[in-house]
Image: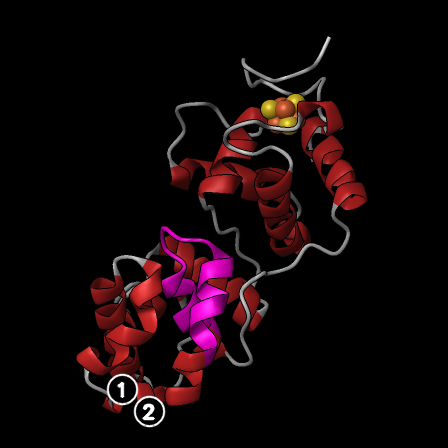
Amino acid sequence: MNSRAETVLEGLDVLYPEAHCELHYRSIYELAVAVVLSAQTTDASVNRATPALFAAYPDIHALAEAEVSEIEPYLHSLGLYRNKARAVHGLAVMCVTEFGGEIPSGRSELMRLPGVGRKVANVILAEGYGIPAMPVDTHVERVSKRLGLAKPDDTVNEVEEKLKRKFPRERWIKAHHQLIFFGRYLCRARGPLCDQCPFGTLCRYPDKQIKE
Ligand code: SF4
């Protein structure tokens, strides 16, 4: 591990020793649906919508048997609710018809499911199955670039590869949660709290906001 990566991991352990997935779920089915729903919205919004959705459709078979139009009202508050209803319904149908009613545990199978791209597949692998993966969402991408773990013009896939190279495999899942907490609560997209940040000397963000 290079010293920058080591310093970041040590600092994140101090800041967020208990970082975790903030989506509420009780099974891999609920996790997969919640992660698909979280595209372009906050985990908190998804958590407000999913209790009623999962009460109505308690397992993947129930969701697969529903009509998309019946699912839509549960997702109204999330934006893009028609697309999201179609995606989670399609996901359920494919899991039932092709994967024996299970959420698959392989990346290539996961990425065939509607609404599941590389990031969502990585979350399901890491969070649902405990398989080392490094999902790169908007927070992880931003803070990795600010912390100098990736270059400003790196693609999301390049950021993922660099983080996986720089962090030990056994730390990928926890580091991913910690980078999300760091981006969500401290190194925010607008108005990062640089005065509270332990990484000032590493930071490559040109507009960091240190009060004189
Ligand atoms: S100094 Fe500010 S911009 Fe830089 S990593 Fe810390 S919070 Fe983010």
Q: Which of 100 and 87 is in front in this view?
A: 87
Question: What colour scheme has been applied to the protein in the rendered image?
Answer: secondary structure
Q: Considering the image in quadrants, where does the N terminus appear?
A: top right
> In which quadrant of the rendered view does residue 205 lie?
top right
Residue drawn at 41 percent across, 29 percent down = 154
> In which quadrant of the rendered view does residue 148 lie?
top right
Q: Name the residue under label 2.
A: 61
Residue drawn at 60 percent across, 28 percent down = 192
User: Where 151 falls versus 180 (above or below)?
Assistant: above
Q: Considering the image in quadrants, where does the C terminus appear?
A: top right
Q: Mark 1 points at which residue?
A: 64
Q: Is residue 188 magenta?
A: no
Q: Is residue 157 left or right of residue 66?
A: right
State the SS at label 1.
helix
Q: Which amino acid does label 2 sit on?
A: His
The spot of residue 78 in percent (x, y) is 35, 60
The crowd level at tag 2 (other Cα within 10 Å; few <14, some 14-19, many 20+) is: some
Q: Do the residues labelled 1 and 2 touch (CB within 8 Å)?
A: yes
User: Where 105 falls versus 189 (above or below)?
Assistant: below
**Res 51 visible:** yes
Residue drawn at 64 percent across, 36 percent down = 186
